[in-house]
Amino acid sequence: MTRQTAQNLNLLTDCAILVGASALACSVPGHVHWHWMVFIGMSAGSMLLWTVGGRVLRQYDVWNGRGIPGDLALTALLLSGVIASLAVLRWVVPSYAAGSLLGRFSLVAVPAILWLRLMTSWLVRRDQPDQPVLIVGIGPLGRHTGLEIHEQRDHRKVIGYLRFADEPSHDRLPAEVLGLATDLENLLKKEVVGEVFIAGNGDSQRAEMQDGIRVLERFGIPFALPASGFRFGRARPEHESVLADGYVHYVSVRRKPVQLMFKRVIDIAASATALFLLSPLMIVVALLVKFTSRGPVLFKQSRVGRHARPFNMLKFRSMVVNAEELKAKLMAQNEQVGPVFKIARDPRITGVGRFIRKYSIDELPQLINVLRGEMSLVGPRPPVPSEVAKYEAWQRRRLSVRPGLTCVWQVSGRNQISFEEWMYLDMQYIDHWSLAQDMQLILKTVPVVLTGRGAS
Amino acid sequence: MEFDGKRTILLVEDHPPERDAIRRILVSKDFNVEVAADYHGAVDALAKAVPHLVVLDLTLPRESGFELCEHMRKRDGDPRVRQVPILVMNDRGSPEDMAHAEEVGANAFLKKPFTREKLLKYVITLLDGPHASRPSVRRLRRQ
């Protein structure tokens, strides 16, 4: 059974639970007759909503990039959405005692589906992509480190080794030697690396190790250094867990796990609420986009997400269909210094497009990206792949966090700052990130969007 | 000590219960097992007879297992002892620990706790595998 088949089975089971819950809800104790209409409406309606919602939220993808808590939160949200929509049936089906019926439905469906989701979460976790690890040093330490990571099967994968200049080549390594330690910077520009183990000797390889650390700090990539370099017979580190693998691990961007969890909770709650409140506006805009120019309502653009993983960013289409082809011809008129393309009176933009761009309405579908966990409300704007290819080393650090709808740059006057300054602001945002700052940025974004100030 | 066709393993472990348990496993597979409780006991045993394999705990009361490795691999030491494969055991088994063990000349590293099967697999690989010493040095020295 392939993993996608397993996930499809998961969807089928969820639908079966919905039908079962509908059946239980409709079989009122004490009443002999069975509400056929209500049963059919309820089961069909809930299954339809569930399937569409699940697809939009990437619930049944092989890997959706979310952790288990985030996944459960979204499942709960989807369930409440389905139940709330079912409440509307009250006006459609006359003999429908919505309250008790929905109560019984929820009592069965909510725990059953959440439980199933929790039980099958290993399915999703199993498909978690491996964190790519690079090891610098091919001596005994480097080799044992690679073997250890290889044996642990904890979603890490050694993508290769770099060799210190004084090390002879070696053939018993669990991964390929990709170059010399001095090639680190070039390699990091090409490859996605989650952590680098610097398996060197602090005496004889000191200079190369120090250079490596400098590069890794600029990239913002976590790295690990051998804990001591000494041999112990009897002594053990007092805090064993910290040095479990014999390395001290360093990060250049401080992780704040509790705050980050709250950020994700706020993201889910706020984007779900915003999608609900703005849905009338979004429906009108969708219709306008559809009927004023040829092409689809939504424009899906490949952007680079956290840890350089690509995703489809959603927008209301504001340009003509062949905009990307026209871009090449217009490149000469680019007004932004650096790898970003922007010109003030872009002829590719449609009439409706100009309006929705002015008030940033075109960005609203990204609330779905936020719900999916691909984006956040606040964070550096997700770059397109061609921009990333042109990034300087220190700019790659932007990819260490979830991209967002708004960031420092967006509230600072938008296109009126240079690319360099923009990157600099994003980097400052990442280094000094806090929830409080996020709240401030959201509050500052609102007036900027409402007045259409600075937007193009 | 009489040579009876069995291969001899020198087991160096200071903790009696563990020592007995490991000894029993090895004896059950028809190995001749000599035991030593520490560095000095092991050095004496090595001087008396050259075993086919040394199974060595790194955490010993005075000198550590690393030092016994260094003693066995000494350039001016008994050349037959230098050939004897060493299997080190330790409760800590970080890559750094393994690298150190390799640097002092250990041939394999077994992290505690281990299963009977794993111990035997390591022992047999070391005795018959590519690390095994040559037949000429395999015979026990008679004292």
Image (cartoon, coloured by chain):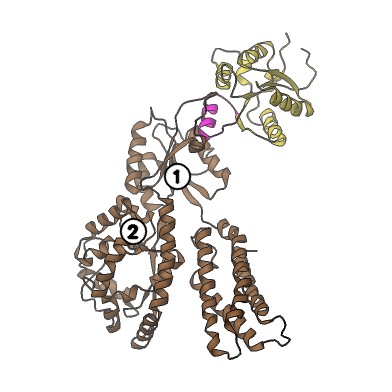
Q: Chain of mark 2?
A: A
Tell me where the magenta segment starts and ends, as one range: B90-107
The residue positioned 56% from the left and 80% from the top of the image is: A48
**Label 1 crowd (10 A; few <14 / some 14-19 / many >=20):** many
Which structural element holds mark 2?
A: helix
Answer with the quarter of the image where residue A424 lies.
bottom left
Residue B72 at x, y = what percent?
A: 59, 17
Which structural element holds mark 1?
A: strand
Residue position for label 1 = A134
Q: Colour of chain A?
A: brown
Residue A51 at x, y = what percent?
A: 55, 75
Answer with the quarter of the image where residue A287 lies.
bottom left
Seen in the picture, residue A338 relative to B97 is either above or below; the reply is: below
Q: Is residue A389 visible?
A: no
**Label 2 crowd (10 A; few <14 / some 14-19 / many >=20):** many
Residue position for label 2 = A388
